[in-house]
Amino acid sequence: MKPEEWIKDPVFQLNLLLWMAREQPDDAYLVYPLFARHNFEWHAVEQPFAFPVATNLDIESVADRTKIRIHRHPEPELILKRDRDKSALYFEAKKSSFSSTSTTTSQARGHLLAAGPAFAEVQTPLKSATLTYVLPQDQCALMGICLGELTAELQDAGLSPGSYSVAGLAVQDASLTYHLDSAGQSAIGCQENRVAVMHDLDEATDPSPLMLVFSVEDCADQDRAGYYRHILQQQVLAALLCHLHAAPAIGSLTITAADILRQTTQGAFDYLGPKRQKAMEALVRENVFVTIRDHWKDRASGLATLKVRELTVSFSDPAKRDEFFDWLESRKTKFPNTAPTVEAMEQMDLFDNL
């Protein structure tokens, strides 16, 4: 996938924003940490926003007397916070813009209201938020018009939407640039209206090292979902190998899916909503842990055992230990990249409730 295509991919967009809020050294950053340099940090990743009771009643009243429809459980891609002024950036990433008459406007209205006075009530001690739509730069003008029209519509209906900005991504002169409008500049405290956040890009540049989190709901092209699952699993396998090589030659090592995901996501896993966390854990369990257990259960009894989200690897025979590492490190060893089944997800819930 070319860099010009990355900027249309919501999975890439979210992970780019996460890296922009991750402090990195000046001489060795993967992505220029624009938000971190302005003192923003992670607050929530793909967590549903629950409106206060009074706001829900207002939304119901508007729905009863108008044709305006508002999503009751908006789910921002990312919320960043800045402690010094208790402000926040509330992000929604899109492949393209849409009009105020589109079927997707229910979600946008929900985001606008979530970034209004309701935000401070729900996200105390944070006091304010700026809704920021992130999409390719050539889509920004139309997106700004849409958000302006929706804001006016909500205000006319007696509701209180929040402030908004539109940020654009573009690939220019082998760099990926982040474009800010005046509202975005003001919210961040950034004087520049364009910041290069990645450099030296070409068609061969691999964006996979940037992936921290993934959910199938973000994947606009479902044909790429397997590719993203493969990337995540390769990161998990690399981390698992590090743990196993560092463990004593004789003995047991137990690791949970959550623990290994905290490592591979650099802690972003803990900021995800429970639904997204469970989906990533299920992916690790079904495609990595189950594959390891099933391969070894008849070859070396007790070498690899699995308890819900927890894999235990036990070595008592140095020869079997070497054989295990040869297998796990071999390029011939294949792990499925399919989505966890509904049954697998339900099984995890069942064990959790025992």
Image (cartoon, rainbow, N blue to C red):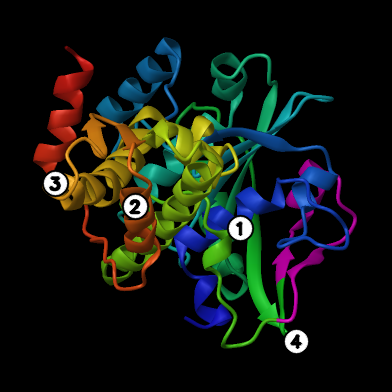
- Give, as a three-letter code, the residue at label 3: Thr
Task: From the image, tell me which residue sits under label 2.
Answer: 319
- Give, as a three-letter code, the residue at label 1: Leu
Identify which residue, 179 or 31, lies in the foreground.
31
Q: Residues within 10 Å of mark 4 (few under 14, many from 20)?
A: few
- Vertical relation: 243 (above or below) 278: below
- Give, as a three-letter code, the residue at label 2: Ala
Q: Quadrant of the C terminus?
A: top left
Task: From the image, tell me which residue sits under label 1.
Answer: 16
C-alpha separation, residue under disc 2 versus residue under disc 4: 54 Å
C-alpha separation, residue under disc 2 versus residue under disc 3: 35 Å
SS at circle 2: helix
Q: Are marks 3 and 1 in contact (CB under 8 Å)?
A: no
Q: Residues within 10 Å of mark 3 (few under 14, many from 20)?
A: few
C-alpha separation, residue under disc 3 versus residue under disc 1: 29 Å
Q: Is residue 66 left or right of residue 170?
A: left
Q: Is residue 27 left or right of residue 184?
A: right
SS at circle 4: loop
Q: Earlier in the sequence, mark 2 or mark 4?
A: 4
C-alpha separation, residue under disc 1 versus residue under disc 4: 19 Å
SS at circle 1: helix
On the image, the x and y values in percent for residue 60 come to: 31, 22
Q: Which mark is residue 341?
A: 3
Q: Nearer the viewer, mark 1 or mark 2?
A: 2
Task: From the image, tell me which residue sits under label 4.
Answer: 173
Residue 75's quadrant in the figure? top left
Stretch in magenta: 177-200
- Give, as a three-letter code, the residue at label 4: Asp
